[in-house]
Structure formats: C-alpha cells, structure tokens
Amino acid sequence: MDDLVVGMAGSGGDGIVSAGESLISAAAYEGYSAIMTKSFGSQVRGGESSCRVRISTRRVHNPGGLLDVAVALNWEDFLNFGAELPVSGDTVVIYDTKTGVAPADIPLVGVAPKEVFAVPIAEMAREATGTEKAKNTVVLGLIAGWFGIARLSMLRGLEKKFAKKGVALVQANERAFVLGEQFAKEHPLSAPRLMDMPVAPKAKMLADGNDMTAAAAIFAGCDFFAGYPITPSTEVMQFLTREIWKYGGSVLQAEDEIAGVGAALGASFAGKKAMTATSGPGLSLKNEMIGLATIAELPLVIVDVQRGGPSTGLPTKSEQSDLYTAAFSAHGDVLRPVLAPTSVADTFDVTVEAFNTAEHYQTPVIILSDQEIGQRKETVDPIDTSRVKLEERRRPTESELRDYARFRMTESGISPVSHPGMKGGNYQGAGIEHNEQGNPTASGKLHAQMNEKRFRKLTPIKARRDLFHIEGNPNAKLGIVAWGSAAGVCREVYTRATAKGFDVKLLVPWLVYPVAEEIYRSFFASVRAGFVVELSHQGQLYRMLRMFIDVPPGVVSLCRSGANPFQPGEVLMHLREAAVSLQKPAASIASE
Amino acid sequence: MFQAKDFKSDLKPIWCPGCGDFGVVQAIYRALASVGRPPHEIAFVSGIGCSSRIPGYTTAYGFNSVHGRAIPIAQGIKLANPSLLVLVAGGDGDGFSIGGGHVAHVVRRNLDITYIVMDNQIYGLTKGQLSPTSPRGLKTVTSMYGSVEAPMNPLLNVLAYGAPFVAQGTPADMTGLSQIVEEAIRYPGFAFVNVRSPCVTYGTEADQIKEHRARMKPLQSLGHDSTDRLAAMGLAQHYCTELHTGVFYRNPTPPPTMEGQLQERQRGLADKALPRHKILDIFVQK
C-alpha cells in the first residue's frame, strides 16, 4: 500500500488533533509525503474536533477523498463532521467500545464497511496510564499495528512530547502505545494493509501554509509586518512576532485592519519590504489603502487567506471566492498582480515571487491563499534556496538624484524610488494624482499619462510562463484549469486520468490576475472539453477568463460553494463525462 | 545651521487668503529650522483636508495619504526607521472623525511622533459641513437647523488617552505657536498640538485670528504647572469656551517609546537568528 488516509474525530479533551500531529510528524521524519487538515466545532474551547492525515510514498497534493481508516472516539462527534470524513465500504472503522454500539449497528448511513473494530480504547488508556487522557496514544498504537507506519518515529515523538513532564509519563504513554499495537496484532485485518516504506528515508520539512508564508517573507527580506488578528490568517503574524526581531525587523499588531495595511505601506514608503495578512473581511477594509499603494507606486505584499464569504461567512472553512475582490477592488483604474499558491510547498515560491514582483514593479501584490493551504500541515521536500533570486526596488543613482523626479516617465514605466533618509530624493508621496515630481495635479492629460504608466509597467508580468504550471499533451482535447487548493486536487486527477489513458492536459496558474491572455489562448487552442475547477459559488476564475479571452464552449465551470474541498474522485467523474461527450459524433454534438 | 526658508517648498498653497494654516506652516518651518534636522531626514504624513496639503509646502519627504489614515502610515514609517523625524498633520475631521480610532493607539504605543491638528471646527475642503469639534447649535450646510451634537474635546481626549505631551496654540500668536511646535518635536515621545487654525471662509466670526488675539489665555500667565496632568485636564475641560494656549501637559519623565523598546528587543535577539537563507530549517523534523 502506498497511500493511506486516516480520519479521526473526538471531543475537545480527547487529543485527536494532537494524535494527528504526532502521526504526521512521525511520517515526515521517516520521509513520507503527508498532508494533515483539522476541523473544529464552533466552540472556542472543548467541543468536537477532527483531523485527516494522508500519508503516501509519493508526493501528495491534497488531503484525499474517502477515508482508508476512520477513528471515532464517540459517534456523535464523528457524525458532526459529515462530508469531511467520508467513509466507504473499504474503510477500516475503529471506534471506542465505550460508545456501547455493536459493530453491526454503527450509525453510518448508506455504507457497510467490511472491517469494523470496537476497541476498548479508553479502558486501555486507563490500564496503561491511570487516566483516559492517553486515548490518543492508544489510537496511534492501533494505527502503527494495523498499517505498519512509523512505529519507531512515533515512539520517539512520544518521548519528545512528554519528556518535559517526566519519565513516568513517557513510559506510561509508551505502554498505551504498545497496548494499541498489541490489540491490532491480536485482531488482524482480513487482508493485511501494510504501508510501503518511503522512497527516500530522509526527514522532510513539515509546515502549514501560514507559517510558510511568514518564513518565506523573512527569506525574501521582509522587515516589517503589521496586521490585525483574523481567522484563518493569524498564524502569519504569530510566526513573524516570534522571529522577525532577530532580523532587525518589527511587527505591529494594529488597532484595526486599515491601520495594519497603513502601517505596512508606511514602512514601504520608508524603504523597507513590508507585508500585511488578512482574510476576506479584512481585505474589504484594506481596499482604499491598496488603491493608495497603487497610485503612490509603493511595493506592498498583502496576504489574503480566503475563507467562506461574504461578510463573516464561514470563518474556519476554505473557499476561493475572494478572487474578484482581490483582482478588481479599490476604486478607480487599478491593476495589481494576484498570485495564488496551490500547496504549502509552493507557498514559499509564491511568497518570494510576491515580494520580488512588488519590489520590481513598485506595486501592491496580493497573495491569495486559502484556509485549507494556510492551516493544513504538509510535508515539504528540501527547497534549494540558492536558485532563488531576490529583487530590490530600483533606487535612484547619484546622478538621478541631482534632478530627481519620483514618478519619472520611463520606457518601462518603472521610476527610480527614493525613501526618507535619502538625500536629494525628497518627494511627496500621494494618493492624489500627481506629476512626475509628485506634486498634485487635476490635469486630465497628466492623469491619463500616469494611468497609462501604472498599467504599462505591469504588462511584462503576463508573459511570465514560469508563473504557470502546464503539463500534458499540448494537443490534448481535454483540458483542466485549476487554481489555489483546488489545483492540488486536479494535479492528482491529472495523474490518475493520464494513467488511465485519458488524453488530458492541465494548467495551474500562480498568477491569477492580470489574466495572461496569450498563455490561456495557447492552452485552450486544442481544447474541446474540460473545466475550470474552483471552490466558489460563481466560479470566479472561469468568469474572469471569459472577460478577457474566448474560452472554448466545451470548457465549463466546475464550481461549488466552499467548506468541503473537492475530492479527486469527484473531479475524475466529471472528466470521464467530458471525455465521453467528445466521443459523440460531430453531428449529434451540433444538434444538442 | 538651517533657516526657516530651507523647509519651504516652491509649491503654492491652495489655502484661502487669510487661512490659519499659513501660520501653522510658518511655525513648522521655524520649529524645524531650530531643531536642525535636514529635510531629507523628516517624514511628514497627512490625510485628507485643506490642512492635509501641508507636507507638500515643506521640503521634507511628504506623504499626503488617504482620509483619516495618516497616523497608521506614520507609525509604519517610524517603526521601519526610528531615526527619522516623523510629523503628522491634518484637520479635526481627519483626526477625530474618520481617523479617530487611531489616535488612542498611537498615544498608548507612545511612538516619538509629533501630531499637529489644525482644528477649525468645520469641514473646509468640502465647503462647510459640520465637524466633530463644531460647537453645538452651529448652522452649516449639513446642520441647517443647528447642530444637536456636542463637540468632542480633542485636548481632554488625548490627555485621557495618556499622551505625555499635549499643547494648544493659535496662529494669532506666532511666537508662541512656533515655540509649542518646536517643544513638541523635541519631546522624546508622542506629542500632540491642537492648533486652533481659523477657517476664513466657513468658520464662525468668533473663531478668527483677530478674535483669537483678544480671547487667548496663555497657560503660563495663569500659573499652570504643566507637569500636573489633573490640572491640565481641568483646564482642558474649557476647550469650547476658552482659548488656552501653551503646554497643558508635559510628562517630566518621558515614558519609554515603542520604537525604543523594539530596538532593544532586536538587539537582544539578533544573535539568535538563523541566516535568512536558512530560515526554512525551522521546519525540518529533527
């Protein structure tokens, strides 16, 4: 077996998420590829919690679909997570005997799993440690026993986790683990399902998207962050609050979202690389300031970790419905690059690219992440950072300072930018339209010239092929476009479909706006059927593409509201239908 | 070393002839000349309004930003580069209406920033609407039957927020105003100066330069002890009826500034950093 999806649910004190974390840490340490997502009830403390951990010997791009293993410490909590923990007939179901439910009566509707184990989890925890707190350790032992995963690394992890609390607790938890393991050995699966060893037994990095954004920002030279706490982006600020001082930088927890982006813009005006992070409601509040960054031509990175909207929406669930606002909001003629990572791993590249783009073009750049990427844990292969080039804004030379004009009309549209402290570079930054010197103007002619300059300077980014991941037969008639967390699902769909002989190609943009017309046109040239996959009610990328290019009529929007991510099987089913539609005789298609 | 003219730009102000803001910008030129920092080491931030045009009339680096948000931007500048002299200026609407939420926070953080409000108790740029400091009963184009709202009291508010330096001036007394602005800039912490800067076009008759000259009561002449915060608050209560000028409160033992504390933290943690290009090592499972 090379791929395993484990889903677990319990009450607040059960430590089910902690078990998931132990499992993924051990997997990462052994060199497996893994992704973990977690989900909670709405209570601030206590209440039900769940997590999914997918472990694989191959690189995984999404949390997977149907569970291979389902663990219910109690059924009420498990069922609360419904579609997030989908069980099939092939799922190995493990639950606590304490629930008093007979294996034949488990409350799952519409499926009859073949392997169901009632395990005295609480009883074993009590036997090993004297309390039921170690239930999650028993669960880890069960998983190690049945699926042969990361036994030594998990024991090692337990030791690290409990070391501070004393040897006695470490040993008690080891006993709990071994009891679980023994139970599994004494009650074997009808057909063994042992996990293969990882391809390269070398420890991987383990990070969530928000921490990766923050670390990448430091890598890129970010010296200032200001923001306001908002789910699901706050971890970006928390990471930087821990680390940025060491590099001589600062974090300001601002009094509101507007002050957060305002202070970051001020730091950029002062010559530093600066960032803010937020989610949808915060992005709505920051709009005016983003427009100011546009007209003042100041570099600024804004992270939006999307959640369900509009308004408060679904604060803890993922959605890809902020694309319109990221691309179009702020009044007036505004244009700014919007970049979307598709995994924790490429959150690094996208964040560094955002800083480089912001600095190079002197523009705000929005990183459009989403809750799933921001808050999921994912193993990351080593990144060769020596290949990464960092850009700095173009500063005026000595001779340019002698006759300095901050907004000088240049061929590229990019003007050398000074900052306070730089002698001879004194200028007026402004939200008001201005001439080349930065002085206010109400001239329609100057306004038109400046608008043209601000748009012209960003044109080259649309030719950046490296901001697009394209794979598959260039002449394929089936095409999939997907962005953000949905792209991780579609990468797997592409691989599985190709393995099954489908002639399909895939386009995943990091640059979601401005729309790179030529790149999409050439991708769609051969395509007769397919879809644009995204987690929003409207299908915002699909509609945005149609604003700028002629999308082939057979390419449709595959979209739905957020909360539950797409599953590879679901998209694969649609792909099959699209393939079938192509096999119909031309005449019958025409008559439809 | 520097003269007032070194801080005056070539840009011609948009202000109406006789506007109080001409006096304020003059006072700022004089104060800056006296303080002696070169223009390129000064960042002057404003929001929107007649008075917010003021950075452009100086030779400093200026940022004429968006309405009510000068303070957040100035905080970013100061934290990014604490060695800069950071000034913020704007009107009563900019600072106490649309941007009012920021004032309490810049005060409690105590950044070494000087905040000058040109308080004319009216919205001038949009042609004469009610402002947050307009007197009760004032008839304007948006209060045709008279304002039914009590004005807010900028002095008392900022004192209550805990500002270590609070003063008031008027262009009717240029010597006093220049001294107040200079003292505010020199104060090592957050300093607030409320300038009663008359609007000649939409302001009331009682709130003009000539009337100020007749009404003003220098706090010094009242024997006020500017180290006494409660006495300052007592006097500040009369914002609507009296025109007190001078320093209301000056904390003789300046509290630590935010940027000063953060610089100390940066120095203390500097040797704990992984090199930037190795930051990802944080994520390696050991």
Image: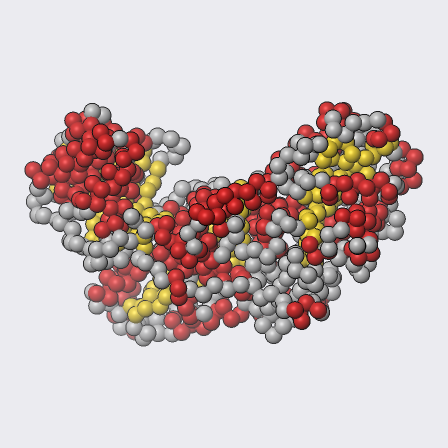
Picture coordinates of residue B216, whole percent (x, y) = 87, 34
Q: Residue at x 49, y 59 (%)?
A: A355
Q: Residue at x 82, y 53 (%)?
A: B4
Picture coordinates of residue B75, whole percent (x, y) = 62, 46
Can the viewer see residue A58 in this picture?
A: yes
Residue A545's place in the image compared with B131, above or below, is: below
Residue A147's place in the image compared with B152, above or below, is: below
Task: Pick whichever, A186 or B191, lies toward us.
Answer: B191
Q: Residue at x 48, y 69 (%)?
A: A462
Picture coordinates of residue A201, whole percent (x, y) = 21, 55
Task: Pick whichever, A219 or A423, lies toward us.
Answer: A423
Residue A364's place in the image compared with B82, above or below, is: below
Can the viewer see residue B199 in this picture?
A: no
Picture coordinates of residue B106, whole percent (x, y) = 63, 39
Q: Is residue A408 left or right of residue B215?
A: left
Image quadrant in which you'd find residue B249: top right
Q: Residue at x 49, y 62 (%)?
A: A356
Q: Is residue A331 left or right of residue A366?
A: right
Count of numbered badges drawn on the protein: 0
Image quadrant in which you'd find residue B120: top right
Image quadrant occupied by the N terminus of chain B: bottom right
Image quadrant in which you'd find residue B183: top right
Task: Pick whichever, B212 or A513, lies toward us.
Answer: B212
